[in-house]
Image: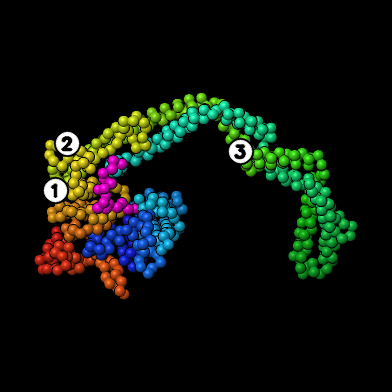
Amino acid sequence: MLLQLTVRDYAVARALDADWQPGMTAITGETGAGKSILLDALGLALGDRADADAIASGADRADIAALFDLQHIPDARDWLDAHGFPPEDQQCLLRRSILREGRSRAWINGQPATLAQLRELGEMLIDIHSQHEHQSLLKKETHRRLLDAFGQHSDVLKPLQDSYRQWRAIRQQIEALQGAQDDLGARLQLLQYQVDELDRVAPQPDELAALEAEQKQLANAGELISGCEQLLQLCTEGERYSLQQTLVSAQQLLARSPLAEALPQVGEMLNGALIQIEEAAHDLARYRDQVSIDPERLHDVEERLNALYELARKHRVQPRDLPDLHERLHAELATLRDSDGIIARLQQQQATIEAQHGKLAKTLTGKRQQAASALAQQVNAQLALLKMAHCRFEVALQPHEDGLLHATGGEQVEFLISTQPDTPARALSRVASGGELSRISLAIQVVTASTSQIPTLVFDEVDVGIGGATAVVVGQLLRQLGERGQVLCVTHQAQVAAQAHHHLQVSKQLKDQRMETTLCTLDGQQRIDEIARMIGGEKISKQSRAHAREMLAV
């Protein structure tokens, strides 16, 4: 649920702060007051494209922040955890800054985010229905999406899409192998030469680092042995001045002195130092004995390194990547040699996936048939309430004719409408007029929104062209939706606004010689006056106030 929206320097909204409540909230105001700006700013917080021209004059940037309560949106909480934006106290803060030079920046819970991430998360937080929604209602893809959302078909649709992706990947592999067979001879000859060359050298994992360390040791063997000898002389092998003998003398001197009792820790430290010197001498002697001057071994190691370096240069890879290259070319050679067998096995896998996909598609078709009947029944009931009882809404399922698999199932979905009794239902684009399409769209939106898992629904002037008793019904429908979540409704209809649980008024005022949009929560007499203005215009009369009181009292 949306808790708070803050807008700074966006268009004429210099400083807007709005707190939002559960239920239905009506957003009203005169034309041009900035109602659309409020929702446009919300859209920017949810990842919509930004326009630097919308930044307020005299400002370098526009800032929008939206705070959401995620208590009843587990999918959003899981998404935030998975993408490294853990929510705090079941809340999520989205921020967006639009810069004058055209760039924008976004944050989720204080962490930098991409616009794609804002949009993906935003789809779980808010569902926006606008007065232009009916334009997308003319597209069959929109019909399928709405039907599947209404029927809650994700449990079948997701595995169906997964099986389609597997099928398509296998199909692409088969096509690639079949295409490669045209140049099979030349490729096989080249691969065989490369693999034979790598087989002769046989590079091993982690071999390069070991060889380079050994080469360094062999090349510096004399210097390493000499250094060990000198250090051993200093530590233990000197006749009079070795570190070991010096420490022993210090221990003996301390033992004979009253300092032994006064400073017992000194004796412990001398004893520890002597142990450390003995261990250092032991390690030096062991390393000296391991190092040998072996010109033949040095020659062999350098030959091996040169072979690896030369092979890496030839194949344009790093020497450490030669084992991976060897394995990859080996696998490709084996694949080409057995391309016919691999194609046959892939085709068998393809057939298995096609059978699985067919079962899922059949199940989805059955679910869609049931959902189509229920959706048509509910939409027709809403159309009757919207004074369109003569219309008949239908959902047609048309099987694909190409015989191929499809990620969305075995059929296309199309919404049909009949606007006259006893006439066949036809496509919306061929039948409905603009006004009729607006009401049909509203009926579909109300029905599909009732099954939405998204707690916040936004309706932006969906009641355009509707008035009188029909507007009352629209308000009642939106209020019913508000009872189960949060509904934000921008409206010019007094009958709709009067049904709201909460009422916000957007207005434009002159401040410091600049027009600014302001937002005010209406209650009591203020709300009566606003409803009266919506009924009768700027001059509010006793009659319009009485009518407003009557509407709010119902």
Do the numbered discs 2 and 3 sit on residues whose CB atoms are within 8 Å?
Answer: no
Locate the N terminus by quadrant. bottom left
The magenta region covers 124-141
Inspect the image, locate mark 3, and give the three-letter code of the amino acid beneath it: Asp
- The residue at which mark 3 appears reads as 324
Alpha-carbon span between mark 2 and mark 3: 66 Å
The mark lying in front, picked from 2 and 3, is: 2
| Residue 49 magenta-highlighted | no
State which tag comes first along the sequence, 3 or 1.
Answer: 3
As drawn, the label of residue 315 is: none
The mark lying in front, picked from 2 and 1, is: 2
Q: Disc 3 on helix, strand or loop?
A: helix
- Considering every residue shown, the one lying at the far bottom of the view is 512
As drawn, the label of residue 387 is: 1
Above or below, 181 relative to 286: above
**Residue at (12, 37) in percent of width and height:** 422
Query: Percent x, y for residue 440?
Result: 20, 46
Alpha-carbon span between mark 2 and mark 1: 20 Å
Query: Percent x, y for residue 180?
Result: 52, 30
Alpha-carbon span between mark 3 and mark 1: 71 Å
Above or below, 224 relative to 61: above
| Residue 129 magenta-highlighted | yes
Q: Disc 1 on helix, strand or loop?
A: loop
Q: In this orientation, does residue 317 appear?
A: yes
Query: Percent x, y for residue 197?
Result: 66, 33
Q: Disc 2 on helix, strand or loop?
A: loop
- The residue at which mark 2 appears reads as 424
State which tag comes first along the sequence, 2 or 1.
Answer: 1
Mark 3 nearby-residue class (10 Å; few <14, some 14–19, many ≥20): few
Q: In this orientation, does residue 282 appear?
A: no
Inspect the image, locate mark 1, and give the three-letter code of the amino acid beneath it: Lys
Location of residue 139 (image quadrant): top left
